[in-house]
Each structure stands twice: as structure tokens, then as C-alpha cells.
Amino acid sequence: MLGRALIRTFLSPTVPVAACTTQIAGVHHHKEAGDMKRFTGVARSNKAKANRNTHVNEKLFRKMRGRKTLLVELPEDSARERESEMPPGEMRTELLKRGLNPYKEAQPRVWNEAQVTFQSIYGIADPYVPPETPASFTDVNNKFDEVKQRLQHKFYNWRMGTNRIRKKQGFEKFDVKTFCAKAEDIYERAHKAMEARDKKEMYRCITEYAFAKMWPDVENGSVRFELVSIVEPSRVVAVRCFDNPPKSGNDIAQITVRMHTRQKLALYDRFGGLILGSEDEEKDVVEYVVFENHIAVVDGEWRLHGKIYPKWLEPKQGTHITHQLTQKEAGVQVAEANALPLRTTEKLEEAKKEKEAADSS
């Protein structure tokens, strides 16, 4: 305390006072008690020094600290940014100044645009589906992992699904047991709207994510669909509720329903050629269909969002799409065709064999 503020030497009153030694500090710590701004460091008693814990004159090193940060202009990046903001006329003039032909040597600009919506997400929150046939008890490790995943899946169905949905206005009495009938109706309406190419009805029944996948089949061809019957009662497999963007309160719910139906489906190309399925043949189809609802709003509706294809599910019939043969494939086919005998030659040989058989008899 004596060395940091003021030092005074007092002798007895009878003895003459000696020389007074005074040390002046640029920072007045004794004034900080009455000034909260100086005490907290918001205001400084001396602009060249900090209020506490330093005796270094910061003015001497201010320029040196400024040299630590060096601003470097990158000409390539700055030129690209400037070119991206140029209108077509200025861009053409800039290319001509460089000696480039803007119609031949310059590549056209590519604009990457994507649709953005907050009432649906482009994906499935949880694509996990528990297997229908449980693992055997002989394989202990797989059986333990499967039981663990099933329990965790059921907990998330309640914690991050049903419980969270019921907290929203209008969904207080939400029950997954009564949802299956509504899901079957939405499923049939969506496919009927796709068959009729009714865009308004499709947007009422399917989300934007599903529309981007289903509409090309209708735009480049045609679809014939008929739901014959429900083989097994549909049941809810998974329930998920989340907000997009995170922590925004814009909740979106997704429900995965297992549907076992008997249906007719035929897919034709734009020339009328059959690509997939048949209009007359009935098939049993097991699907895991995902339905989505924007529950953040009161007037949100359940719509078909997508399908989940687990690894253990039997693969579906693939499409048979014609394509143009390469020169090598065409040459192989011509060689195989030339190697085949003519039909007239075969008939002559058959007649010759018959004549020989008749003569021998």
C-alpha cells in the first residue's frame, strides 16, 4: 500500500521533518471506490493505461498491435464476387475487354435454386423400423441389440412423439389407434389424385417432398391405381415430433404406418408402353408409409410424406425401361443374328429328314 500510492515519513514533532518522498501513479486506484465505472473498467482514469493490474503504457505498443492483423485482398475471390453481381451487359463488356468471346468461350451462369417451405421437411425424421421377425435367442449379441433398439424406439414414440403432439392446441385428444383409418383414406385419395393429374388435390393429400417424387411419373407417363382391399389392419409403427428450424416452436409431426394391402398398379411411359405392374394382376403389398402434419398451426392436415424401405423387406419389382444400344452392343446383336440359320434352311432340312424317314420305312 505504501509503495503503490503515497509514502510520507513523519518524525516526532520535536524533530524537524525530513524530505517527503512521493510516488505518483498514473492509475488512481483510490478513486475507484467511489466510481463504479472506473472500478468495473468501463471508464479509465488514464486512457493510456488500464485501471487494474498493469503498469505498461499501452500507447507505445498500439501500432505494434495493429501490425498483428494484416488485411490481404485476394484478387481472384474479389473478381469472382464482382462478376457474380454484374448484370449481363457489363459482364459481356468485361469479357470483351479480356479478349474473350462471351458467346463461345464463356460458360453460361448456373443458378442453383431450391424450394424452401416451413410447413414440411425434405426427409424422414427417423427411418428406423423394427423388424417383424424377432432375432433368435441363440444369437445373444444380436438379440440384446434388437431388444435395446425396440425399447428405445417405444420410448421415443411416447417422449418425442405422442406426448409432444398432445401438448399442441387441437391435438389434446390425439390417439394413434384412430389414426390408421384416416391414413388409409389419405393413401387412396393421394393415388387417385395422381392418377387424375389433379395438382390441387395432390397438394391436399401429399407434401412437397412427396410431390417431387410422385409427379414425374405422371408428367412423363400415366398411372393406373386401384385399392382392392386391406389384407391386414394397419398399425402405427413410429411417431415423431420435432421443430424445424430447431428451437423455433415450428413443430412438425410424422407418423409411420404399416399398411398391408391388395392393389393393382400399372405405370406407363409417355408412349403408352407398360413400365411396371399390371392393371389386371392383383398383388399383396406391405409398405411403411410416412404421414406428416404441420401441427404448429391449428388448421394443419395430415398428408402423405414418403415411404420407408427397410433392408429386411423384400425388394419390389424393378422397372423395365428401354434405352438406346451402344455401338458395341448393336454389333454383338448383329453378329448373333447373322449366326442364326434362316427359317427356309431349317424347313428344307426338316423336309429332307422327313423324306429320308419315309424312304427308310
Image: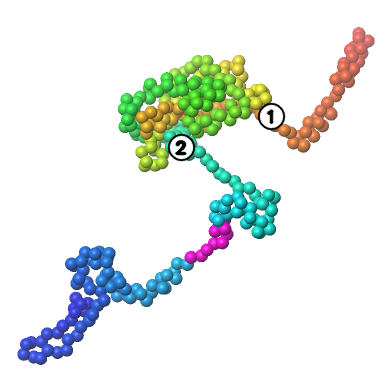
- Label 1: how many Cα within 10 Å (few below 14, some 14–19, many 20+): few
Give percent across and percent down for residue 176.
38, 25
Please identify the residue farthest to the right as the structure is shown.
359
Please identify the residue farthest to the front as the structure is shown.
89
For residue 163, above or below residue 26: above
Q: Real-space Cα distance between discs 1 and 2?
A: 36 Å
Q: Which residue is mark 1?
A: 322
Which segment is the magenta one?
A: 71-80
- Label 2: how many Cα within 10 Å (few below 14, some 14–19, many 20+): few
For residue 9, above or below residue 172: below
Q: Residue at x 28, y 73 (%)?
A: 46
Q: Secondary structure at mark 1?
A: loop
What kind of residue is marked 2?
Thr
Front-most of 131 and 221?
A: 221
Give percent across and percent down for residue 314.
55, 27
Q: Residue at x 69, y 53 (%)?
A: 101
Q: Which residue is mark 2?
A: 117
